Image (cartoon, helix red, strand yellow):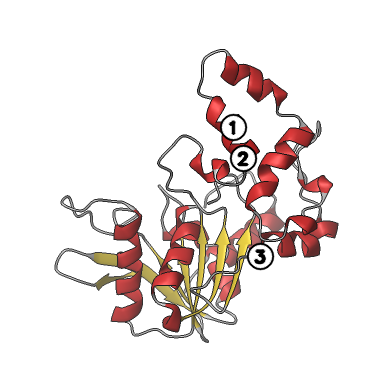
């Protein structure tokens, strides 16, 4: 049992959440590609996509909760966990995207809910855009940005973000501008890439006490981060540090 130092009540909850009746399977999508996945629950299909350098067990606490309402497919992305490595493949976003699309099409899933974090969050959005007829909704948490320049994800937000973030790699000027990123400046930078900046309350931004995560602003936060994604009927992006 992991974490033997936890209180008995917490251990019991941990065991309940991480226990599963199903065992992971391996789905062969093509001669070169197979994905390990774990299926649980009953209901409309929901696919869980993990962060980079993790695997489907990342969702062992979440999957049992979602399985009460969905048929949950937690997957190991190619080359992660126990999904085989194709040494000839280029492990970039298009490759991961086609792998997830292949998984959905191989199982002939429709009305799919895509849930992902980091690289999984980015894939939830790009997969939905590629096969919109199969996707019902998207939840993208902290989506990873496949940048071509330093800090591209933030720099695309607005001109101030491009100026300040782009300058951080310049000797002498970079440290000075980093020092200048107080609450007001960082608020202007971070406010450039949101769906509805009006709903981005001042309390969202960092203060001397650190990042705010108050539950009383959750409704406004949801409006601020909602994604009008053309590839899905409904989509929500949950705040991120490396967002597109």
Q: Disc number at residue 80?
A: none
Label 2 near label 1: C-beta < 8 Å? yes
Q: Nearer the viewer, residue 186 or 41?
A: 186
Q: Nearer the viewer, residue 9 or 209?
A: 209
Label 1 near label 3: C-beta < 8 Å? no
Q: Nearer the viewer, mark 3 or mark 1?
A: 1
State the image coordinates of residue 158 (x, y, percent, origin top left): 62, 44
Residue 186 left/right relative to 34: right
**Callout 2 secondary element:** helix
Residue 22 makes an appearance in the image? no
Q: Farthest residue in the right direction?
A: 216
Residue 233 left/right relative to 192: left
In this view, 164 is above or below 28 = above
Between discs 3 and 1, the one toward the N terminus: 1
Q: Disc number at residue 163?
A: 1
State the image coordinates of residue 72 (x, y, percent, origin top left): 48, 75
State the CA–CA distance, disc 3 to disc 1: 26 Å
Q: Disc number at residue 159?
A: 2
**Callout 1 secondary element:** helix
**Label 3 CA crowd tier, 10 Å (few <14, some 14–19, many 20+):** many
Residue beneath disc 3: 226
């Amino acid at each position: 049992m992991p974490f033997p130092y936890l209180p008995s009540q917490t251990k019991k909850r941990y065991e309940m959440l991480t226990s599963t009746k199903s065992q992971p399977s391996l789905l062969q999508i093509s001669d070169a590609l197979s994905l390990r996945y774990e299926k649980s629950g009953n209901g409309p299909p929901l696919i869980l996509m993990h962060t980079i350098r993790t695997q489907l067990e990342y969702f062992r606490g979440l999957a049992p909760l979602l399985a009460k309402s969905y048929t949950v497919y937690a997957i190991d992305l190619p080359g992660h966990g126990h999904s085989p490595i194709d040494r000839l493949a280029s492990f970039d976003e298009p490759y991961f995207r086609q792998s997830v699309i292949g998984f959905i099409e191989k199982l002939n899933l429709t009305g799919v809910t895509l849930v992902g974090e980091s690289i999984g969050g980015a894939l939830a959005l790009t997969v939905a855009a590629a096969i919109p007829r199969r996707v019902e909704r998207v939840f993208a948490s902290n989506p990873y940005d496949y940048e071509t320049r330093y800090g591209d994800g933030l720099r695309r937000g607005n001109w101030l973000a491009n100026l300040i973030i782009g300058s951080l790699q310049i000797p002498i000027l970079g440290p000075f501008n980093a020092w200048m990123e107080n609450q007001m400046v960082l608020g202007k930078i971070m406010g450039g890439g949101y769906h509805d900046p009006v709903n981005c309350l001042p309390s969202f931004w960092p203060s001397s006490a650190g990042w705010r995560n108050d539950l009383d602003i959750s409704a406004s936060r949801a409006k601020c981060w909602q994604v009008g994604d053309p590839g899905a009927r409904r989509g929500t992006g949950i705040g991120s540090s490396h967002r597109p």
